Image (tube, rainbow, N blue to C red):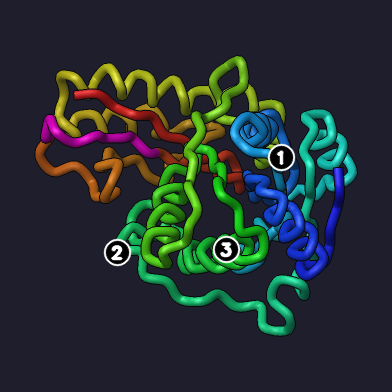
Amino acid sequence: MKIFKKRDQLKSFLEESKKNKKTIGFVPTMGALHRGHLFLIEQAKKKNDLTVASIFVNPTQFNNQEDLDNYPKTLEKDIELLESVSCDVLFVPTIAEIYHKNVVSNKFDFDGLEHEMEGKYRAGHFDGVGTIVKTLFEIVSPKNAYFGEKDFQQLQIIKKLVAKNQLPISIKGCAIYREKDGLAMSSRNARLSSEQRKVAPIIYKVLKKVKKKFLEETEGEISEWVENQFKNHPFLQLEYFTIADEKSLKPINIKEFDKKYRAFIAVFAGNIRLIDNIQLKN
């Protein structure tokens, strides 16, 4: 696996590959890699001649400095994991390489997608996401880019980013990769205490129950039931639960049978924030 720290060196290498008609698949990450990330790499390798991963903990998408400071950094292990699935190229830029001396986000209009769910609770988060993803796309210029559906709102926003900027990149959403007990894989899981880790699978169990309830109950009834599951829980605190249209991410008003819906949830385990979602069927 070739490792680059400088954008110009990476671009030069990739330009040579493109001259040889090689297609590039790209998996941007913030490191602290787990099996879910490797699944994205494997999907990219199936459809592309060259698979590129990036590791960059992007400061502008954190609205909580403590969360940024505590975000796990495991570069040596990450490199071993990427090599285990035969990733071809790794880009590991510094903050200065990406932002130079101006570590601020650009402002984006994602047609309202950025104001729902995560956008309500993480001010400026999606400006940070848009800034880093657009920058990385400009550097790598992939044909395909791969993102997990655990961050479904982010996935929809990146699709919107590509459409509005007319970027010739196909965005591929990949299914949520879960632990055996159902907990969605996340780099933050490593920070859970043993007690928190033991109860965290409740999040997915609740979502699976929501999927069944959606067939016969109203959104209000389901939301009340979800809130009761976390009320006075010793280790988990519900931040939000919503059922929304997959395309617009607007909360459901009246169930329409020609629309696709998804349930979204965010839960705190201590100061560790966990998110998950599940597709619902009418």
* First reached walking from the N terminus: tag 1 or tag 2: 2
* First reached walking from the N terminus: tag 3 or tag 1: 3
Q: Which residue is mark 3?
A: 61
Q: Where does the image place residue 121, in percent across and percent down from the top left?
A: 43, 58
Q: Is residue 63 visible?
A: no
Quadrant of the rendering where the C terminus is positioned: top left
The span picked out in magenta is 256-264
Considering the numbered disc 1 on the image, is that residue within a helix, a strand or a loop? helix
Tell me what residue is drawn at x 53 percent, y 32 percent.
Answer: 234
Q: Which residue is mark 2?
A: 111
* First reached walking from the N terminus: tag 2 or tag 3: 3
Q: Which residue is mark 1?
A: 191
Considering the numbered disc 3 on the image, is that residue within a helix, a strand or a loop? helix
Tell me the mark number nearer the camera, choosing from 2 and 3.
2
Q: Is residue 147 visible?
A: yes
Label 3 to label 1, Cα distance in Å? 19 Å
Residue 33 drawn in magenta: no
Residue 260 drawn in magenta: yes
- Nearer the observer, 269 or 187: 187
